Image (spheres, helix red, strand yellow):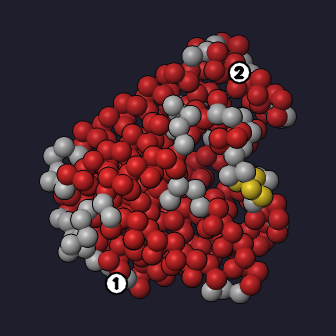
């Protein structure tokens, strides 16, 4: 499995020297925002932000804007911070709902401080995201992030409704992926395009690119939950199964294996049972099918950029982002 950080580094190198500078400003601002709300909340908000991940969503904001000339730098940095804050907030809240002890291999706020403080930490991150974006003065940007945040909440509700239901249709699963993951990718690209004062068609096209790679990202993330080693994913195999979350690999495997279709998913209640089910899903060939679907969506995302007038470096960098989603599996 290729290191995600290596691909992010390659993307930044292709995109131009202004991207590392802007990413550094985003990191500085995120740290400032985390520190500003009392020692206890600041500690947990800061730790959540510092855990960081790949900063893929902020990177998308910056890349969708393209060359720095003519872009609203204040809105650009605010948008990059805002999408990362929303993403971090959803992770903290998800860990409360899932009673998750680890996130990216580190103890969660829930496990360290309990549900009340974890919920407050997530709420703080959400509120700071919108305050930061509103201060930049773009109503269109606030609307974009608001739509994505509403979609996150709707997606979470759908996921809870579908828990332990192995009969979930693929179409409903894909819609859930769009709501819970892809809409924030879409908003990230829209915010960058808005900061660069692109016209409505370009904003929509870049948003569609983000939405597609967001769906592919989630599909491959669900594949990794079944097949990925804990050293790479930061969590145990089959974590989704133990939570009752029905994903594409399980849906496809149940179509291929009648014995799997007969399993009561609530009976998968221990890590050992989850790993055993992961092995059976993998043996069914469902993971290859899920990867193929994700690759097709990535290809659609890249094709959708063809009609846009983009700087050569910008187009190359966005193509590399799409490829990096796939590279998580190689």
**Please, what secondary structure does the residue beneath circle 2 have?**
helix
Residue at point 25%, 73% (across, down): 71
Q: Residues within 10 Å of mark 1 (few under 14, many from 20)?
A: few
What is the tally of numbered marks visible in this picture?
Answer: 2
Cα separation between marks 2 and 1 = 51 Å
| Residue 115, image x, y percentages | 79, 66
Q: Is residue 218 visible?
A: no
Relative placement, left or right, of 79 versus 66 is right
In the rendered structure, find residue 173 and report the number of the disc placed on it: none
| Residue 162, image x, y percentages | 63, 41
Residue at point 37%, 35% (across, down): 297
Instruction: Classify the position of the N terminus by image quarter.
Output: top right
Up the image or down, 255 lies above or below 151; here it is above
| Residue 175, image x, y percentages | 47, 43
Relative placement, left or right, of 161 versus 270 is left
The residue that label 2 is drawn on is: 279
Up the image or down, 102 lies above or below 326; here it is below
Quarter where residue 260 is shown: top right
Quarter where residue 15 is shown: bottom left
Q: Residues within 10 Å of mark 2 (few under 14, many from 20)?
A: some
**Please, what secondary structure does the residue beneath circle 1 have?**
loop
Relative placement, left or right, of 125 versus 317 is right
Residue at point 64%, 15% (across, down): 283
The residue that label 1 is drawn on is: 137
């Amino acid at each position: 499995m290729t290191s995600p950080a290596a691909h992010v580094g390659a993307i930044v190198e292709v995109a131009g020297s202004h991207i590392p500078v802007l990413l550094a400003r985003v990191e500085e601002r995120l740290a400032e925002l985390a520190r500003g709300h009392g020692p206890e909340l600041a500690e947990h908000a800061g730790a959540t932000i510092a855990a960081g991940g790949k900063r893929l969503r902020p990177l998308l904001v910056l890349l969708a804007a393209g060359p720095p000339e003519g872009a609203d730098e204040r809105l650009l940095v605010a948008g990059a911070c805002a999408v990362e804050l929303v993403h971090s907030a959803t992770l903290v809240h998800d860990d409360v709902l899932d009673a998750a002890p680890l996130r990216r291999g580190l103890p969660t706020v829930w496990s360290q401080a309990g549900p009340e403080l974890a919920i407050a930490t997530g709420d703080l991150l959400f509120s700071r995201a919108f305050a930061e974006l509103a201060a930049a003065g773009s109503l269109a940007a606030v609307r974009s992030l608001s739509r994505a945040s509403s979609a996150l909440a709707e997606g979470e509700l759908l996921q809870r409704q579908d828990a332990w239901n192995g009969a979930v249709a693929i179409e409903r699963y894909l819609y859930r992926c769009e709501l819970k993951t892809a809409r924030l990718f879409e908003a990230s690209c829209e915010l960058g395009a808005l900061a660069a004062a692109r016209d409505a068609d370009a904003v929509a096209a870049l948003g569609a690119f983000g939405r597609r790679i967001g769906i592919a990202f989630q599909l491959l993330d669900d594949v990794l939950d079944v097949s990925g080693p804990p050293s790479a994913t930061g969590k145990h195999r089959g974590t989704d199964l133990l939570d009752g979350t029905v994903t594409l690999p399980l849906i496809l495997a149940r179509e291929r294996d009648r014995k799997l279709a007969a399993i009561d998913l609530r009976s998968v209640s221990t890590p050992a049972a989850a790993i055993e089910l992961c092995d059976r899903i993998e043996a069914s060939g469902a993971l290859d099918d899920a990867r193929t679907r994700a690759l097709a969506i990535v290809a659609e995302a890249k094709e959708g950029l063809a009609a846009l007038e983009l700087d050569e470096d910008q187009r190359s960098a966005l193509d590399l982002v799409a490829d990096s989603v796939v590279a998580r599996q190689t």
